[in-house]
Structures are given as C-alpha cells and as structure tokens.
Amino acid sequence: MTKTVALVSGHFPPSNLVGAHRARLWSRYLPEFGWTPIVVTGDPACYGERPDPDLERLVAANLRVIHAPTLSNRRLRLVNDIGVRAFLGCYRVLAGLAARREIDFVLVTIPSNFLAPVGRLIHLRHGVPFGIDYQDPWINRWPGVDRPLTKAWASYRLAGLLEPWSVRDAALITGMAPGYAAGMLDRNPDVARSAILAFMPMGSAPEDFDLVRTLHRPSFLFQPDDGHFHMIYAGALLPAGLDVLDAFLGALKELQKLAPGVASRLRVHFVGTGTSPDDPQGHRVLPRARMLGVHGMVTEHPHRIGYVDTLNHLDKSDAILILGSSERHYTPSKVFQGMLSRRRIFAMLHADSSAVDMIRSARAGCVLSMVQAAPPAPAEIARELEKFIKDTSWDPDTVDTAICESLSARASTRALAAALDRACAGKAPA
C-alpha cells in the first residue's frame, strides 16, 4: 500500500541554494519505492536569493508542491532565514494535511534549522510520525559563539534549546553522512536508542545532465574550444584537504618545468572554494597559486554558482578535478557527478577511500592515492598530469557508471524509503 510523506524544505526550486535539491531529488524517485511525496516549502516570491527558473524544469512531473505563506524579508528586515519566515505557514499546511489524513509521515530536511520543530509539533497534535534530515550539523561552534550578545552567540544558544526539543520522539533521523548527526545523537541518547537511523549522500541524477544539455547555456568561467585544456574543481575545500590542494598546486609548478608546452595549455578552474559561499572576495586558492607562481594556470570563482550553471560547466570542461583529504573515510559524491558529465576525472584521494576503486574499476580517469595521509610528491603528480592531458584515447562510452550506483540519487531515495518503512512500522497516526 502506498504511503505519503510530507517533505518539508525551506527552499525548493526555483531556489538556487544547495539545500533545495535534497527534497527535489528524493521526490523524483520516491514513487518507485512505494511512497508518494508532497513537498511543503516557502513561497519563492519571498526567497532572499535570486531564483533560477530553469531549476523548476528539473522537478518531477506531477509532483504536488505546496508553497506555504511566507513573511517577506522586506517586511521582517532583521530576519532573513526562510525557516523563521515560513514556519507558521508550513505548520498550518502540515496541520491541514494531517487533519485530513493525507500524510503518513513528516520529514523535515535542514537547514533551515528553524523549521525542524514543525515535525514534532505535528506529531504532538495529530500523532503523525516525523523525522529530521541533517544536510549539515545543527549545532556547531562557529566563530563568534563565545562573544556575548552577538548574532553567532544568540544562534548557538537558541540551537542548544531548539534541537533537543525538536528531535525528541523522532521516529527517523537521516543525514548526508553519519558525522552530520553524530553530535546530536551523543547529546540525545534517547533519540539514538529509539529512532531509526539512516544516512545517504545527496546523489546525482542523470536526468539533470540530460536537461541541462538541452538548455544550451553559455559558459562564463571559460571559453570552451579556445585551445586550452580546461579542468574544473567545483565545491568547497575541506580543512583536511588543504595539504592535498598544496600538493596539486606544487605539481603545476613542476609541470611548468617538466612539460612547458602542456602547462601552457592547462587551465584549472576552482569554483565555490572560498571562505564563504557568498563572498566573491574570499579567495583561498589564488593566494596559494600566486606564492608558487602558477596563478597564470589557475582561476578561482570563490563563491558558489547555481546548480544548473555548475552542471553546465562540468559538461563543457575537458576534465573534472577531485581533491580528497587526509581523512580515509572521505568519499566525494562528486565522483558520480563527474562520471555523469562524461568527462575524465583526475583525482587525488586517500588510499582507503572507497572512491579510489570506484574510479579505477569504472575506467573513469586517473586517481592518485595517498598513503598514510601524505600526498604524492609534486613531481610525481606532474608526471601523471602530463600523461593525463596528453591521453586522447579515453572514451566516455566505456565508463561503467553502474559501479557508482550507490552514489546516485535513486540509490539514496531507495535507502530513504526503506528507512521510512521501518520508521512507520506500527506507528500509524493516532
């Protein structure tokens, strides 16, 4: 028997924020696994960021999306968070669905963290089981939390009050990875004992690439077919990955000595690697490149670009750069996304990362493994990079994407549906 889950997400297409895609991807595939999704979200007219109308074309056909009444941030100037401004509207929508017995489960994906309490409120009033999905940890000791009466200080203390109340009685806790909810589970042992726990990556959907290719958007980071070899790294830089970045930049310097003709063709583009997702001046790669004298080979767009633009640039590049970290468990979800772009992958990963075997087995490109957290020497990386750029025999049709099926959005949704089934067992609405 098909059940219905209300996916509560503060942002949803046409929102350009990363958090909008969790509910979008899940809602595409949930019907395959016995669940009908209803998305409850804020009003796009009240989003604080610039929307991207093309994103709405990536939403599953016939999906029921309910845009809850949302306070404009022009009227509520001190509060920009969509979770605060849409909270009452989302609650009323969910309460109506629950009263009419149209939903069997409420799953709130955070951020926005301020929407998290709505699940337990619906559970207390209507008996509908609920869960919270952690796309990021809720409580973090970010800079400024120890300075009294600052915004960071207030947010940190409010989170400390809201999180334990919001997760109490949760039937399901999910997240992008176990570490995202680990702190909460340590602080709330009753939830760790009683809730179903399931963790799955965001995943990538081949349908997204198919649609982006039909849009024929121009690229703005580089000009394809200009005679250069364009390699792109898209995504944040982790603190444990800075040594890997430095080793790669050192390899660019070695490449200038080893093969100056190859080096003159290479352009490496870093996107979204800055100190803040929204700071166009928060460069982290370019200063390092300048110190080594390789800034002519490197560009950095430190703040994030939209999802459609990201896929478009991956599709128009010559290769995808993936830099892991010194942590052995780190497995970049960008591996499968790189395969779907039909572009070669040049990766530097810890030897114990599961992505190493994935890339090699799928014949998706070149991967250099790091033993005991030490990156290869720059000269070694430069030699591999030279061979990689010169190789013209690679055929995207030979890549076995099935090997990375575990990183797909469909596999992520399958895991969610199984977790929802377990969480709902014997927990029908009162």
Image (spheres, rainbow, N blue to C red):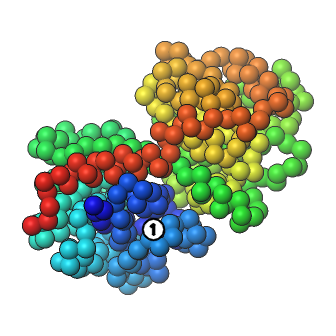
Residue closest to the far front = 1
Badge 1, how many Cα within 10 Å: few under 14, some, many 20+?
Answer: many
- Residue 226: percent from the left, percent from the top? 88, 49
Q: What residue would you read off at disc 1? A: 12
- Residue 108: percent from the left, percent from the top? 30, 61
Residue drawn at 82 percent across, 51 percent down: 224
Please indicate, yes or no, whether residue 44 appears anywhere in the rendered image: yes
Residue closest to the far bottom = 75
The quarter holding residue 186 reads: top left
Up the image or down, 380 lies above or below 333; here it is: above
- Residue 162: percent from the left, percent from the top? 19, 59
Residue drawn at 48 percent across, 50 percent down: 409
- The one nearer the camera, 265 or 197, is 197
Quadrant (top left/top right/bottom left/bottom right) for the N terminus: bottom left
Residue drawn at 75 percent across, 64 percent down: 216
- The one nearer the camera, 123 or 238, is 123
Residue drawn at 59 percent across, 52 percent down: 206
Quadrant (top left/top right/bottom left/bottom right) for the C terminus: bottom left
Q: Identity of the amino acid at label 1?
A: Phe
The quarter holding residue 150 reads: bottom left
